[in-house]
Image (cartoon, rainbow, N blue to C red):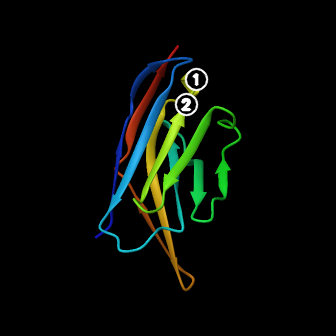
Amino acid sequence: QVKLVESGGGLVQAGGSLRLSCAASGSSFSFNVMGWYRQAAGKQRELVADISSGGTINYASSVKGRFTVSRDIAKNTVDLQMSSLRPEDTAVYYCNAEHNLFGRITTWWGQGTQVTVSS
């Protein structure tokens, strides 16, 4: 059974940095896409950044230039380096992994890690 475990959240002052890590276990395959979503209180979950097995990267416009996503395909891990953090980055951050098998897409989520940015 696939399990995603995040680490690295916490409390940081505005302008600071944090690094989130996510490790997938229980899979015998590499994921097509791995990435990070976030959900702030009272808001919908939104994509922060993701990266495909081919190296295509997507960033939310609000984090471009401040966040960097990276992954190790062999280890099934994905990291998110967050810099120049703002109070509006405060949210629960979720690791996401997606596998496409002959057009059938399966998605997994981590349990979430809280990131709080104080002003």
User: Of all residues shown, which one is farthest toward the bottom?
Assistant: 102
101 up-or-down from 50: above or below: below
Q: Quadrant of residue 27?
A: bottom left
Is 66 placed left or right of 32 in the picture?
right
Q: Give amino acid for label 2.
A: Asp
The residue pinned by badge 2 equals 89
Residue at image x 69%, y 34%? 65
Q: Report the quarter where the N terminus lies.
A: bottom left
* Front position in the image: 64 or 43: 64
Q: Give the total number of marks visible in the rendering.
A: 2
Give the secondary structure at mark 2: helix
Residue at image x 41%, y 63%? 108
Residue 74 image position (x, y, % from top left): 43, 63
42 up-or-down from 97: above or below: above
Q: CA distance from mark 1 to mark 2?
A: 5 Å
User: Of all residues shown, which one is farthest toward the front?
Assistant: 74
Disc 1 and disc 2 in contact, CB within 8 angstroms: yes
Residue at image x 66%, y 46%? 59
Residue at image x 54%, y 41%? 43
Residue 41 image position (x, y, % from top left): 47, 35
* Front position in the image: 74 or 23: 74
Q: Quadrant of residue 85?
A: top right
The residue pinned by badge 1 equals 86
Give the secondary structure at mark 1: loop
41 up-or-down from 52: above or below: above
* Front position in the image: 88 or 101: 101
Q: Give amino acid for label 1.
A: Arg
Residue 78 image position (x, y, % from top left): 46, 51
